[in-house]
Image (spheres, grey):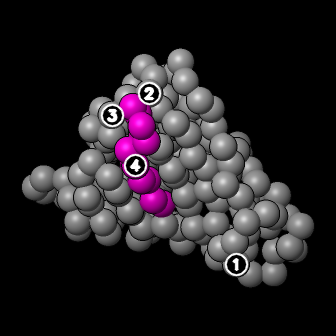
């Protein structure tokens, strides 16, 4: 499994950031890759809720189905792909002074036999995509006047660069 992770400071309280990232169907407003997101289960959002996402990947569109594994408003969402490439996506909002530190990570598998250099490049690309998404979230929430994006690293064994 590879881990891609990035974080950003947003000059808004965690509740405002949470309001955007927890509205899954608004994902295309800030995601660099999600074209469409649709809730597929009944009931309120939370643990066990499922959704379908249509995303762009290179020159293709892919459809994945996800299940929410953790739901802790206004701090943490963890979802796992249940149909599609193996991946777990985590978003964490932490109070930081007068704003929020938002961290996004994606732990994902790669096809067996893929050369290490290619895997490293793919992980770096995913980290860059996360950084783009964080910047878009900050822009949508309206806290773009303060500190920037900080990449946390990519490591096939969950460590730093």
Q: Magenta residues? A: 89-100
Task: Determine whether 132 is above or below 110 in the image.
Answer: above
Q: Residue at x 42, y 53 (%)?
A: 92
Q: Give the image location of residue 110, x and y in percent.
A: 69, 72
Residue identified by numbered label 4: 94
Element at badge 2? Answer: loop
57 vs 115, left or right, is left
Q: Residue at x 73, y 66 (%)?
A: 160
Q: CA distance from mark 1 to mark 4?
A: 25 Å
Task: Determine whether 73 is above or below 66 in the image.
Answer: above
143 vs 24, left or right, is right
Q: Give the image location of residue 100, x and y in percent.
A: 42, 39
Q: Residues within 10 Å of mark 2 (few under 14, many from 20)?
A: many
Q: Residue at x 64, y 66 (%)?
A: 3
Residue 55 makes an appearance in the image = yes
Name the residue at the bottom extreme.
112
Residue identified by numbered label 3: 13
Instruction: Say if mark 1 contacts mark 3, CB within 8 Å.
Output: no
Q: Residues within 10 Å of mark 1 (few under 14, many from 20)?
A: few
Q: Give the image location of residue 12, x and y in percent.
A: 37, 29
Residue 149 shown in magenta: no
Element at badge 1? Answer: loop
Residue identified by numbered label 1: 157
């Amino acid at each position: 499994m590879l881990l891609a992770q990035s974080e950003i400071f947003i000059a808004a309280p965690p509740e405002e950031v949470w309001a955007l990232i927890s509205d899954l169907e608004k994902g295309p407003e800030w995601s660099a890759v999600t074209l469409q997101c649709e809730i597929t289960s009944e009931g309120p959002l939370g643990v066990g809720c499922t959704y379908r996402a249509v995303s762009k990947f290179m020159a293709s569109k892919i459809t994945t189905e996800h299940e929410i594994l953790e739901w802790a408003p206004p701090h943490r969402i963890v979802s796992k792909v249940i149909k599609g490439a193996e991946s777990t996506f985590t978003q964490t909002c932490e109070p930081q002074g007068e704003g929020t530190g938002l961290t996004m990570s994606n732990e994902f598998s790669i096809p067996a036999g893929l050369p290490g250099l290619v895997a490293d490049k793919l992980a770096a690309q995913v980290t860059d995509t996360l950084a783009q998404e964080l910047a878009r979230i900050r822009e949508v929430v309206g806290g773009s006047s303060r500190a920037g994006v900080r990449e946390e690293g990519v490591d096939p064994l969950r460590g730093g660069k």
